[in-house]
Amino acid sequence: MIGRRVTHRTADGVRVPGTWRPAFIRNGDYFLTDLFIYADGLIDCWGLVTLEEFEEKLRSGWVATELPDGAEASAHDLASWRFTGPRTWLTPELLLAEVRDTIDQLNHRPDSTGRCLAAVDAFLADRTEEKRSAARAAYLAIPETQRHYALGDMDRKDGPLQVLLAGVGGETDRWPGEPVDQEEYDEAVAYFEERDRRAAKGPRTPADGPAEGHAPALHLPISHPLRPSPAPGKQGLRNDYPAPVTVGGVVHPSADQAYWAQTAADPADRAAIAAAPSASAARQLAADAVRREDWELVRTHVMTGVLRAKFTQHPHLADVLLGTADATLLYDDDSFFWGANGGRGRNWTGRLLELVRSELHAHRAGLG
């Protein structure tokens, strides 16, 4: 639940909304701290990570949901203590589900509760057991800690919802061993019918769609692939991935080398960079060469052209890029201009990959 806990971070001048919740970090001892969650799918748990990486932090126990008896804990600059008989109701799965819901809420799109209520509406409009089963599955997909808030009814909690989804003769979690009778079921149906009558008109759908992608952010860490792979995965999106790129009639071993060759003012230097044995060697040759005048004003245009060439000339890599859906692509690089670098860089390579991805989608849809 976001409540009033509203914050943000700034990424290249762009305000990214977020919220936070308390959590324990296990770094030797246990530290009570704040877990910051942002609309672009990044989570700050003593370092910005993607949702996928956050799940790894949970599995490893870095973000702790188990608090062993006798463990040392502290809150920085506040207090320290030792656990005695600790009780916790969170599991890695529950906390991950709550964080996923929070990201949906920050983007003003249906979270697990919203999806459940939509499935309930579908069942009430067509009361088949198939629709009831789908609504029940959607209810169970709500984090267990949040289910009693699903109806926003502090008096009845999720009682009417459980009764509706159990059906006559079924059992609820609130009253196990007591089958739902017809009168209880009719009361639950009446509850939802009255709720629908009272409901305000739903939120307007933005004409241009959501402001953020629905897919989790994808981290493209620095790597140094030496040879192509039949299944390159996200490594194939790296500029130094060995996929020949033809730019200006010249074949370059990788997108990196195609880019660095164009930085040089002298044609001889450009040829030497294109022929370099590796992307790192090409970068070094480019650093030693005289740079083209006003390079910083045209470099994003040049990189866009290189990336278009790479993914046009290698359809299997275009498939990898298209497979990222509308995810924010966080590209790490030695350069803070091109790389995201834990939220400290401008991430221009990631942005341009997203642009080229959109162009590829448009082309395959016959739009250009």
Image (cartoon, helix red, strand yellow):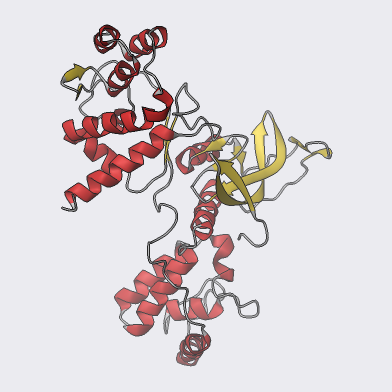
Q: Position of residue 68 (x, y in %)?
A: 68, 39
User: Vertically, is 165 above or below 248?
Assistant: below
Q: Which of 29 and 219 is in front in this view?
A: 219
Expressed as whole percent of the image width and height from the top left, the position of residue 298 reads 37, 29
- Left or right? Give the position of 65 relative to 266: right
The answer, for residue 222, to whether it is visible in the render is no
Q: Which residue lies furthest to the front in this view?
A: 293
**Horizontal side, residue 285 vs residue 32: left or right:** left
**Could you say which is closer to the camera, residue 320 or residue 295?**
295
Residue at 42%, 47% in the rendered image: 216
- Name the one closer to the observer, 79 or 263: 263
The N terminus sits in image quarter: bottom right
- For the question of whether residue 361 can be seen, the reply is yes
Above or below, 70 against 175 in this view is: above
Q: Looking at the rendering, which quadrant does residue 284 occupy?
A: top left
Residue at 26% x, 45% y: name it: 359
Residue 344 position in % (x across, y down): 56, 32
**Which percent across, then down, holds residue 115?**
43, 67
The count of marks equals 0
Q: Residue at coordinates 45% horizontally, 25% vertically from top-left? A: 333
Residue 167 placement, left or right of 9: left
Q: Is residue 327 above or below residue 136?
A: above
Front residue of this view, candidates 230 and 256: 256
